[in-house]
Image (cartoon, helix red, strand yellow):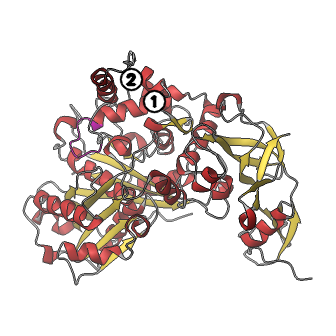
Amino acid sequence: MSQPEFTAASFNKFLGEKKLMGAKCTKCEAIYLPPRPMCTKCRVKEMEWVEVEGKGKLAAFTCIAVGSTMMVQEGYGRNNPYCSGVVELEGGQKVTAQIMGVDAQQPESIKIGTPLQLEFVERGEGENRNTYLGFKPA
Amino acid sequence: MQRAKKLGRGVAMVGAGMSKFGAFPEKSMRDLFVDAFTEMVESVDKGIETNDIDALYLGDAATQVFEGQGHTAPIAADWIGLTPKPATRLEDACASSGVALREGIIAIASGIYDIVLVGGIEKMTTLPTERVTDTLAAFADMLYEFPAGFTFPGFYAAIATAHMAKYGTTVEDFMRVGIKNHNNGALNPKGQFNSSLRDIMNSKVAKAQQKGVAVPTWKDEMEFLHDPAANPVVAWPMRLFDCSPITDGATCVLLVAEDLAKSYTETPIYIAGTGQASVAGLHGWNELTSLSSAKAAAQEAYNMAGVKAGDIQIAEVHDCFTIAEIVATEDLGFFEPGKGPQAVKDGVTTRDGAKPINTSGGLKSKGHPVGASGVGQAIEMWHQMRGKAGPRQVPGKDIHLGLTHNVGAYGATCVVHIYERR
């Protein structure tokens, strides 16, 4: 059975279907997140898509007041900061994501190590509306 | 076992020059590069003929975006009258000119060239802050990190929160780095700020008095830096004065084969070691409190030079953000992991401390024209190690061993150089 290409385009399409998908090397069983077409341990292109359970903990974060253009268009800014973080998943992979359900106005209240679960984030309008990777406290 | 790398033949720095750093609406990168070049020519004690230069290696991070101009190296070469000599641009984000320096060294060591000009350029103030933010964010992973909302300060801020959680580092620790580097920068007339945070604070008080509005009552720099009106959060815990500014500037140094060095000056600065390493986006990081590329680059440079961290007398490290300086001093082995903040607190890293860091003012105060900063660090070595840094000269020390640490993005590239005066 042919699999979707192991690309960001496929990854994002899966996100749109509310699935966090990684690329698993069928030889050594390493799971890559973000996905990639070649296992850098075995150096072969024998991947398969696997759904990754969206559980992990907060490894690092920041509350951003001067945002990227994309986030400013979402209404974030000086008076409405947002939290971006690094999440360490239970499988050991690290992913970056917007962290929802925390008070970005009170960064001291956000604790590293907080257990997190998947929370898909919708951004953009009309045809440009897309699903992005997010997490929230479990 | 990896073989210790060494240069095929020795290389020395015999001249150095930089434009003023700041905001120059009337000038393009090529004009700034001419300023750097003419100062470099004047700095060569026994003179240099442009025709004798074999090649140009130019660091340039994003001039396509900032000025809409690509393929910048031949233009820079033309503006200084170096054509038809080969001119090559290198792009590794904010490590572009540190990498250009390394490539220039390797080119001479290979034997192909005897005399190489290494430079760096960036003209950043053409764009509004939001577009600069997007341009710098593109030095990280646009497919997998940008969608998380990360900005460039945001990445270092995340490293800062990890450092705080692991070692108990505080926002005051970050602020102390800024105060120190601005104190150094106040003595650097080429720098963008050229004023201490105390000066900046006092000038804001004076302005308020002049305008007849409520006069702030900060008792010292720390209170000033804690005031969200004076020092707003950019990406917590990084505030405005934790961040290097947006800067226009150009830099260059002249490298020659070691056996030619004394034809140009009696006090050349020799390249004792060079190291470079890379690491992928945050998904490839084992720990978030350290740049693995910096550790690897430093190890390569130390091995080549045959020296240890403790032997280094002075260093310019990549303080694009205050946390970055703390992490750099730990990655380079100057201080144990987690002990960087205490070293700053104890004054170890001040100009008259045991390990002076960023005597130029660093990127924080001197300014950070991203593609020019790596060579800018080498220029400070040129001045300090020849005892000619003027009012900011490290006091009471004969400096014969120095180090520079230049980072691209938040550690995807790191390049380290060690310099020696014999």
Point out which mark residue B221 bears: 2
Pointer 1 or 2: first along the chain = 1
Instruction: For label 1, count other residues whose C-alpha is less than 10 Å away and answer few (under 14), some (14-19) or many (20+).
Output: many
Question: Closest to the observer: B365 or B134?
Answer: B134
Q: Position of residue A41 (x, y in %)?
A: 73, 68
Answer yes or no: is residue B110 visible. no
Mark 1 and mark 2 on one chain: yes
Residue B190 is a magenta residue: yes
The image quadrant of residue B180 is top left
Q: Is residue B170 above or below residue B319?
A: above
Q: Are marks 1 and 2 in contact (CB under 8 Å)?
A: yes
Residue visible at 34% across and 73% down in the picture: B72
Q: Nearer the viewer, residue B107 or B121?
A: B121
Residue bearing mark 1: B175
For this rendering, which residue is in front, A17 or B254? A17
Could you say which disc has been placed on residue B128 in the image?
A: none
Q: Is residue A44 left or right of residue B411?
A: right
Q: Chain of mark 2?
A: B
What residue appears at the point 62 percent right and 37 percent down from the top-left corner?
B161
Q: What secondary structure do most residues of the magenta stretch adopt?
A: loop
- Helix, strand or loop at mark 1: helix
Range shown magenta? B185-192
Q: Position of residue B185 (x, y in %)?
A: 29, 38
Q: Does residue B305 sit above or below A116 in this rendering?
A: below
- Badge 1 amino acid: Met
Badge 2 crowding class, 10 Å Cα cut-off, few under 14, some 14 to 19, many 20 or more, is many
Membership of A108 in magenta stretch? no
